[in-house]
């Protein structure tokens, strides 16, 4: 079974994915990459961006679920799937 070229992205942390995305942007901005390679790099950049967006959304959802005590201090977080 062949894996997709960007399967490794799923295991990346937000920071790793963002660093890889910044590297791709720098590489493409130099303009010294052949067209076919530029397309592959751009597609990887799109996959990295989507992964960062998912991780950021999950973090935002988690922050929204933090419960506060009466004096305004965090007392824990509710599960994301439990309402």
Image (cartoon, rainbow, N blue to C red):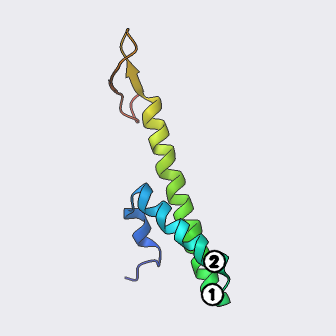
Say which residue label 2 marks.
28
Using residue 62 as the reference point, say whether residue 37 is left or right of it: right
Q: Nearer the viewer, residue 29 or 58?
A: 29
Is residue 83 depicted above or below 53 in this figure? above
Crowd tier of the residue under label 2, counting other residues whose Cα lies within 10 Å: few below 14, some 14–19, many 20 or above: some
- Residue occupying image coordinates x 52% and y 64%: 48
The quadrant of the image that shows the C terminus is: top left
Residue 12: assigned label: none
In the rendered image, residue 8, in percent from the top left (x then y), is placed at: 40, 71
The residue shown at (49%, 60%) is 18
Q: What's the residue at 47%, 64% (across, down)?
A: 19
- The answer to the question of whether label 2 and label 1 lie on touching residues, with beta carbons closer than 8 A, is yes
* Residue beneath disc 1: 33
Locate residue 26, reporting x and y percent: 59, 73
Q: Secondary structure at mark 1?
A: loop
Task: Please report the residue visible at 51 percent of the width from the left and 56 percent of the height from the top.
Answer: 52
Task: State the SS at label 2.
Answer: helix
Which badge, 2 or 1, comes first in the chain's sequence?
Answer: 2
* The quadrant where residue 59 appears: top left
Q: Quadrant of the N terminus?
A: bottom left
User: What percent of the width, then of the height, locates residue 2?
Assistant: 40, 83
CA separation, marks 2 and 1? 7 Å
């Amino acid at each position: 079974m062949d894996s997709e070229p960007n399967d490794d992205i799923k295991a990346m942390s937000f920071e790793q994915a963002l660093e890889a995305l910044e590297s791709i942007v720098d590489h493409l901005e130099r303009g010294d990459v052949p067209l076919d390679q530029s397309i592959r790099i751009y597609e990887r950049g799109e996959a990295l961006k989507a992964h960062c967006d998912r991780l950021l959304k999950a973090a935002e959802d988690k922050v929204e679920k933090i419960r506060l005590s009466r004096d305004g201090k965090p007392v824990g977080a509710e599960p994301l799937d439990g309402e």
